Structures are given as C-alpha cells and as structure tokens.
Image (spheres, rainbow, N blue to C red):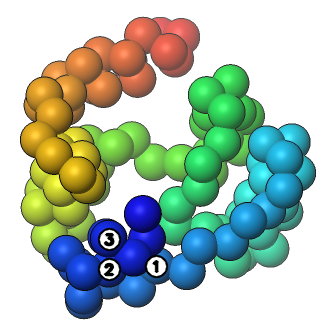
Amino acid sequence: MVADFGKDHPDITVKPIYAGSYQDTITKVLTAIKGGDAPQLSVILSTDMYTLIDEDAVVPFESLGDLRGGQEVAGRLLSGVHGKQPDRRQDLGRARSSARPS
C-alpha cells in the first residue's frame, strides 16, 4: 500500500512503522505526543479517538482546510488512495459535533 501511494505521490515520504498491537500502538502514540514527537498518521482503534480528544492530541479534520494546501490534502484523503469514494466531509463534521458534549 505504501509503495502504491509513493508511486502516485512521489513528493510525499511515508515511513511505515509496525508498533505492535492496538494497545501497544496507542501507548506509543500517546508517549510520542507527550514527548513532542507525535506521528503524523496512526492506525488505532476508533475507541482510542476519545482518549486522543481528551488529551487534545488531534485536530478536527475540517481544520486541515485552514493550512496551506489543506483542502487538497483533505480531498485526497477523503477520495481514498485506490479509488473515488463518496465525499464524507459533511458526515465527519456532524460526527465530530455529536461526539463532544455541548
């Protein structure tokens, strides 16, 4: 998957790291965040998102549009690496809003 992505996006370097089980991974992610060396991307369990939200360790996906090139990156992520998928930006915003208490 990384090789395929690299062919399509030669300007982006991806260094895959196997961190162990999901529990090992979230532990390493939290440790890296607290040490100031957070990963740019991680595959974790959906339930771990609440831990990351509580730790202020993630930013809302839609805020990527505020960064240079953010809309393009967000569009690429939402369209998938291997094919066009439905635009879920609206759904992501609603899901984030309903996940946090008002």
Residue at the (13%, 28%) spot, across then down: 86
Instruction: Residue under label 1, please give it.
Output: 14
Q: Tell which of 2 and 42 is nearer to you.
A: 2
Left or right relative to 70: residue 92: right
**Which circle marks residue 84 in the picture?**
none
Q: Secondary structure at mark 2?
A: helix
Left or right relative to 23: residue 18: left
Left or right relative to 40: residue 27: right
Residue 3 visible somewhere in the drawing:
yes
Q: Within 10 angstroms of label 2, few (less than 14), some, or many (20 or more) residues?
A: few
Query: On screen, 39 above or below 27?
Result: below
Query: On screen, 90 above or below 11?
Result: above
Instruction: Residue under label 3, please give it.
Output: 4
**Which circle marks residue 6 in the picture?**
2
- The quadrant where residue 91 appears: top left
Q: Tell which of 99 and 21 is nearer to you.
A: 21
